[in-house]
Image: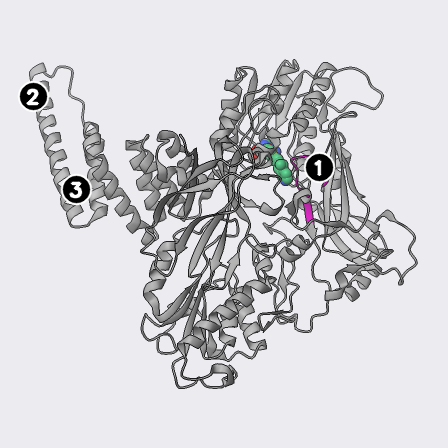
Amino acid sequence: MAEVGAAGSRRSRRGRKAGQAASRRELISRSVQSAEHCLRERDYGTAYAHFLLVLSLAPELKDQFKETFQYALFKWAEELYSLNRSQDLFSCYEQALDLFPNDDVICNSMGEHLFRLGFRDEAAGYFYKAVKLNPNSADAKENFYRVANWLVERWHFVMLNDGKRNLMYQKAIEKAVQTGCKTVLDIGTGTGILSMFAKRAGAPHVYACELSKTMYDLACEVLAANNMEDEIKLLHMKSHDVRVHEHIPEKVSLVVTETVDAGLFGEGIVETLIHAWKNLLLEPKPKYADGEGYGQVIPAGAVVYGMAVECSEIRRHHRVFVTEVAGVKLGTAVQFSSPIHSSRKANDVTEPYATEKFGRVPGGYKTLSQPFQAMTVDFNSLQDLESIASGKTCRISVLVHEQGQLDCFITWFVLHLDSEHNLSTGPSEETCWEQAVFPIQNLSADGYFVSVGDTVVVDVSCPDCYLKLDLVTVIRAGEVDNTMSCSTMPVGNETELCDALASLHTRHQEDNVQEPCILETSEIALLNNIAYHESFKTAIGKVTSSMMPEESSSFRTTNDVSFPKEDPLYVLDVSEGFSILPLIAAQLGRVKSYSSVEEEQHCAALERLSERNGISKGSLEFWLNQLEADDDVLQRPKSDKLWSIIILDVIEPCGLIRQEVMEKAAIARCLLQIGGKIFPQSVVINGILIESHALMQECAVQGTGPTLGFNIAQSINQFKVPVHVFLNLSTLPCVYLSDPIELLRLDLMNPYLNSFSVATEIKVKICKSGQVTAVPFWYHLYLDKDIHLDTSSATSHWKQAAFVFETPLSVGEGEELLLGLHFQNSNVSMTLRRTQE
Ligand code: 44T
């Protein structure tokens, strides 16, 4: 609007202002009317736009219209979502948050949309903000708990609780500072602990960089909590982007870092230090030089060790070793493969190794060789670092000293912080570390067995950041005279010979024209679980035979070219991921199975298996195709009520109940034929009271003791979650304080009887005095009243979850407690109190 000249009379200006105010009021009230009208008409987009205008013009109305505005926003967002207009959706939320920056409900809803569209980190940020804005919001809290693991990975708690590791770093840093290091850069500072060690040791200048925004924010909070915010300069950036003069005033004399993973190199320490030596560090100290003014790195170096290992837990998660499952022959029709494999292609996002804490692996492990030195690295030598980065490969011969199945190589390392301070991440060490696992795959069935005196040949390298161990061949004791127990040789002319030999040992697949079918590790464990599939086979058989009593199905084979005249029974498997249950059902005869697998390789695998097992073509359908295909072409159920069996996948491999299971059961219930069944028909949640300090260490930093007096717990524990997942209950160090207790029964056949939210209190008798710290829980899935699956069994593909209490409760033997259980939206929470209180 054109400015009125200074000469304009006061009166006319006031008059104009009054006029403007009136027209503003008019505009606002009209817009409110329009908005409300649009809401009634369910035109949410326009309603939202009107409200936006109203509240921008008249912020004083925010309180009055907040809820209606939110309603319009959420409704409009749903429409935008279903129209795939995600950009517009997020713009709306950003506008809404400009108006209501401190509104937890909008924040939480924004997080939910981000999450739904796959932006998990961003979603996590909004959930965190929503919880901070309103710590009592149950929705925001549940959402936050589900994503907290991405914001702050759980190993932070474990590492900060590892007092030995902290003390070792502190001593090494102290020594370096006392011998003259004045300027320190902490790369990947995390919560800032190493920087604080340097400051406390007296370093005059300490800088730290951290690339994760959440960790950077956390480090700021930690420094403030320890009154060090003015003494340590924190940078939110990757070390590669740090520039001398611009970000730090001078080159530093000490770099401290713990950017190492279980496979040592996976966090990019080699590239990080190459960059640091070239740009951020003073010259390295010449061998015989004295005094100050040189650059150095803590850790000074590392040695990586490897070992050949037999381990049934690794085997069952990484290779399909069963040849027949509940009557379905697997044979060689499909080559199943673990997602962890050394022959990664460029741009492969999967890591070439898994990790496992071997001290706690269920079923234990057996060493087949002595530990061998796989690689050494001097972090103070640019030349050494560059040689590793160039991808040099070392071929190592390892003598087998114990017979067994060669399931994997495992590696660990000793970190030499300096000449006197070391940390080992070995499998028998009392540390927070896991070991890296390189599963062996694709040998012939008897190729895995190795005998004393055999030699296992392995190539070790570190291309593209990750440590890699490749099995070259197994030289059988009789084949070649071999007296070396373990020798390292650079890869030379023998390579071709060995490769030729290796190909003799690997399986020849006549039908290896097709791509391997890569399964998740839990899918592989499931496929290896014969008892699981047998249970289903029996339970499905019982239902189908009860539903066609008029004839014996035994002389009907599935090889019939045409379907019998009578209608078949329909079985729908809505398992998540790969499942052969539809094949098992189809083999029972007169059954038409529907699989809900989505991935192309899964469909292809099921089709091949179906063909190999002589299952007639029409007996297996893919639900996805169904949704798209013409109804008349495929024989689909004529009415919606034709399913005889619907198989639901109720438990996630991590040990939690899947989201919306009861809602799905309610829908499934409506689609069942009379006499039809949902599998499982009911789910019993079982639990047990335990005292476990190991579990507490993984959930929260335990005071200032382990962090050597620094206050880190308070800040990082904001990211703790009450339910711990992926637990191996069978090997968790703990004391049982009660017998197993039935916590809750969910009846999936009558889902309306269990309202989706349940609160109960259960009496628990204490059988041993101690401190109750947690309640691990697992499930019995009842396929019918006689057949159930136990998710805590040794062959289960499920892990367990545990509810961890805020504070431990001291209990005495014989005492009776009340365990409160709350089940809402598939989330479990618990409380514990004494009966007499
Ligand atoms: N491994 C956990 C610890 N960073 C990995 O953002 C321990 C794994 C673990 N910042 C078994 C056991 C355990 N510039 O916050 C992270 C990360 C940051 C950088 C700036 C850089 N060049 C980097 C590189 C990484 O550093 C922090 C620590 S790195 C991860 C430590 C129980 N398996």
Q: First in sequence: mark 1 or mark 3?
A: 3
Q: Compared to 558, does 821 lie above or below?
A: above
Real-space CA distance between mark 2 and mark 1, rounded to the nearest whole angstrom: 80 Å
Observer-side mark, 1 or 3, equals 1
Q: Quadrant of residue 631?
A: bottom left
Q: Is residue 627 left or right of residue 731?
A: left
Kindly identify which residue carries mark 1. Answer: 425
Which image quadrant for residue 563? bottom left
The residue singled out by tag 3 in the image is 35
Asked if the magenta segment contains residue 492, the reply would be no
Gap in angstroms between the C-alphas marked 1 and 3 = 63 Å
Q: Residues within 10 Å of mark 1 (few under 14, many from 20)?
A: many
Does label 2 or label 3 sit earlier along the sequence?
2
Q: Are marks 1 and 3 in contact (CB under 8 Å)?
A: no
Beta carbon of the mark 3 residue lies under 8 A of ligand 1? no
Identify the secondary structure beneath mark 1: loop
The answer to whether 499 is drawn above or below residue 252 in the figure is below
**Magenta range:** 425-437
Q: Position of residue 269 (x, y in %)?
A: 67, 36
Name the amino acid type tagged 3.
Ala
Dot label at residue 15 = 2
Q: Residue at x 40, y 44 (%)?
A: 114
Dominant SS in magenta: loop
The reply to whether residue 655 is visible in this rendering is: yes
Any atom of ligand 1 within 8 Å of the CB at mark 1? yes
Residue 426 in magenta stretch: yes
